[in-house]
Image (spheres, helix red, strand yellow):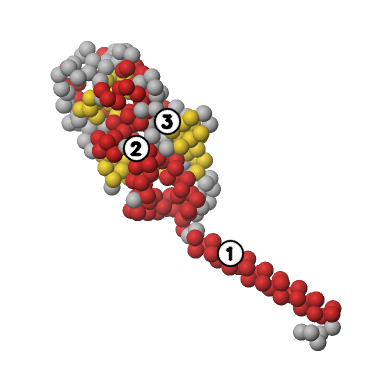
Amino acid sequence: MDSLPPALRMDHQRRVRRSLAGLLAFACAFASTLALPASAACSRPILVPVSAIGKSVIIKGEGISGAYPDLLRDLGAKYGCDFQFTAVPRARQEALFATAKADLLVPATRTPRRDALGYFVPVISTRATLISIDAKRAAIHTMGELREQKSLRIALVRGFDYGPAYQALVQELTAQGRLYLEPDAIAVARLINGGMADATIMAPMIFAGAVQDDGRVEAMLAKMRIEAVEELPWTESGLYISRSSVSKKDRAALEAMLAAAVKSGAAWDAYKRFYSPDVLNLSVRPR
């Protein structure tokens, strides 16, 4: 090398530097393919409108967090998916999914109506219950008993769906003038706390998650009366992937990363970061 003329020596050094730079770029690209499997990467941003649902989805101003947004962001960083969240009322969230203007519906329990619109991915098992703060009235075990207690006024979240028995009850209570439909769980809690409604139906973790951070209603936690209703059994809860707006390749990638999160326990860990063991024990089971 030292015997080469200065011009040739400089040219040789430039060639070596270019070769090293090329090798370094190749090594980085190869490493990125190992960390981000091509089969798991999403081809475009995934649109996820969400509404506030306990600690599962928390909306404060412009900020969106909670068990599901945090889980999806973690998966997105790991596998290469850009999840774009927007805050909307629950009824609009359902409408956007139904018209293929949303790629995911999250969180959601499994129902036949939603099965027609999307592919369901189970994450946890959950159960909706009758929730009130009245410790003195007669116990309710079935939808029939709830219908018979005609003095009870029921407040529900517009857009929630716990299956055919739930939807039939909604229609009957509406006809009887006993139903309040509210945009979210905290609005339901305020109605009950203010004496405008007597009870609601939803998963206890949703109700508890909504009231525990609101000073106006947090005292309800100590008075919660939770009653299992025969027609509302344990069911799978998770999210739906749109049949219309999401490509087969992206759907396969989303299903694979979510299945891995459930199997590894990452999905359950996301819940444990936001909910106390007492709340989880009331209405949630890992899959």
At label 2, counting other C-alpha atoms closer than 10 Å, the crowd grade (few under 14, some 14-19, many 20 or more) is many
Q: Position of residue 240 (x, y in %)?
A: 39, 41
Label whose residue precedes the other's in the sequence (1 or 3): 1
Residue located beneath label 3 in the image? 52
Label whose residue precedes the other's in the sequence (2 or 3): 3
- The answer to whether one can see residue 93 in this image is no
Label 2 vs label 1, nearer the camera: 2
Residue located beneath label 2 in the image? 275
Q: Position of residue 3 (x, y in %)?
A: 81, 87
Q: Are marks 1 and 3 in contact (CB under 8 Å)?
A: no
Up/down of 284 relative to 143, above or below: below
Q: Are marks 2 and 1 in contact (CB under 8 Å)?
A: no
- The answer to whether one can see residue 53 in this image is yes
Q: Residue at x 50, y 43 (%)?
A: 83
Q: Position of residue 230 (x, y in %)?
A: 17, 31
- Image mark for residue 191: none
Left or right: residue 254 compared with residue 197: right
Residue located beneath label 1 in the image? 28
| Observer-nearest of 35 and 240 | 35
Q: Position of residue 184 (x, y in %)?
A: 39, 25
Mark 3: secondary structure: loop
Mark 2: secondary structure: loop
Left or right: residue 184 compared with residue 87: left
Quarter-wise, where is residue 212 in the image?
Answer: top left
Which residue occupies the extreme bottom position in the image? 3
Q: Amino acid at mark 1?
A: Cys
